[in-house]
């Protein structure tokens, strides 16, 4: 399976691979080199950061002390994504836009090799943000680089016989996931983001973001392992 990209690549970079239990400095250093190799070819990246374990730790701590609403869980998640976004902006400081895209009004044609975005508002995951940014920029796909290597017919973490899909329509995909968003939902693309992508005609390419050789093959237009939705 192969795919062809334009000059701007929008990546929903899973917080679970940047901050699995603590910041994975080994991966982040490798990812920096990985991105730099494509920047030398004139490509630009928009990186939308998830919250990862940082988000879940704060949500869990709040829940042990008080009854926490979904809106407040979302705000905790949003601020976790902003902290992870600032981590990446700091690492790419010399070539990244100094402004974190933390609201839609800040979306603009990339002026720097790298643009970093975070969560925006309750009810929207960073999947949604990445798809919204892609649609606003006229980019036809989002690379969802998290832990799952594919979309599966059932939870692959619980079922050893889960079968991967290589390609799905948005209608087919939406039948596999819950209809409504809630904080902490585990799905390659959340229901709100999936609905937006279907309306805007944006594809999602699901890959294991930790597998950088596979990611490289994808961006080079070579065979890769993953699922294309759209």
Image: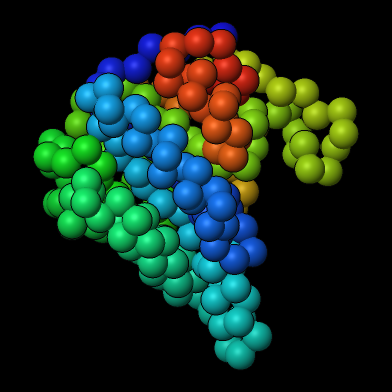
Q: From the viewer's side, name the closer residue of 74 and 100.
A: 100
Q: In this view, does 45 lie to the left or right of 226?
A: left
Residue visible at 87% across and 28% down in the picture: 161
Would residue 30 be seen by someone viewing this image from the given angle? yes
Residue visible at 12% across and 40% down in the picture: 111
Residue visible at 30% across and 51% down in the picture: 92
Would residue 193 be seen by someone viewing this image from the given angle? no
Residue 34: % across, % down: 44, 35
Q: In this view, does 175 lie above or below 184?
A: above
Q: In this view, does 200 lie to the left or right of 214?
A: left
Residue 115: % across, % down: 25, 45
Q: From the viewer's side, name the closer residue of 133 and 194.
A: 133
- Quadrant of the drawing holding the N terminus: top right
Q: How many marks?
A: 0
Q: Is residue 56 above or below residue 50?
A: below
Q: From the viewer's side, name the closer residue of 224 and 67.
A: 224
Q: From the viewer's side, name the closer residue of 200 and 159.
A: 159
Q: Quadrant of residue 108?
A: top left
Residue 116: % across, % down: 29, 50
């Amino acid at each position: 399976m192969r795919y062809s990209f334009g000059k701007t690549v929008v990546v929903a970079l899973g917080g679970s691979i940047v901050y699995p239990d603590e910041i994975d400095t080994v991966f982040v250093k490798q990812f920096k080199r990985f991105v730099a190799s494509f920047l030398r070819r004139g490509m630009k990246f928009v990186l939308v950061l998830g919250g990862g374990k940082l988000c879940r730790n704060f949500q869990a701590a709040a829940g042990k002390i008080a009854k926490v609403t979904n809106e407040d869980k979302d705000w905790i998640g949003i601020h976790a994504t902003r902290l992870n976004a600032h981590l990446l902006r700091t690492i790419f400081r010399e070539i990244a836009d100094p402004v974190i895209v933390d609201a839609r009004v800040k979306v603009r044609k990339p002026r720097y090799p790298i643009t970093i975005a975070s969560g925006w508002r309750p009810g929207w995951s960073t999947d949604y943000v990445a798809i919204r940014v892609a649609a606003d920029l006229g980019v036809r796909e989002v690379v969802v680089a998290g832990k799952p290597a594919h979309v599966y017919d059932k939870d692959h973490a619980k079922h050893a016989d889960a079968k991967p899909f290589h390609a799905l329509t948005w209608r087919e995909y939406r039948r596999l996931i819950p209809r409504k968003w809630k904080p902490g939902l585990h799905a390659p693309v959340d229901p709100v983001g999936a609905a937006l992508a279907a309306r805007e005609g944006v594809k999602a390419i699901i890959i294991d973001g930790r597998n950088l050789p596979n990611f490289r093959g994808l961006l080079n237009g070579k065979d890769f392992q993953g699922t294309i939705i759209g």
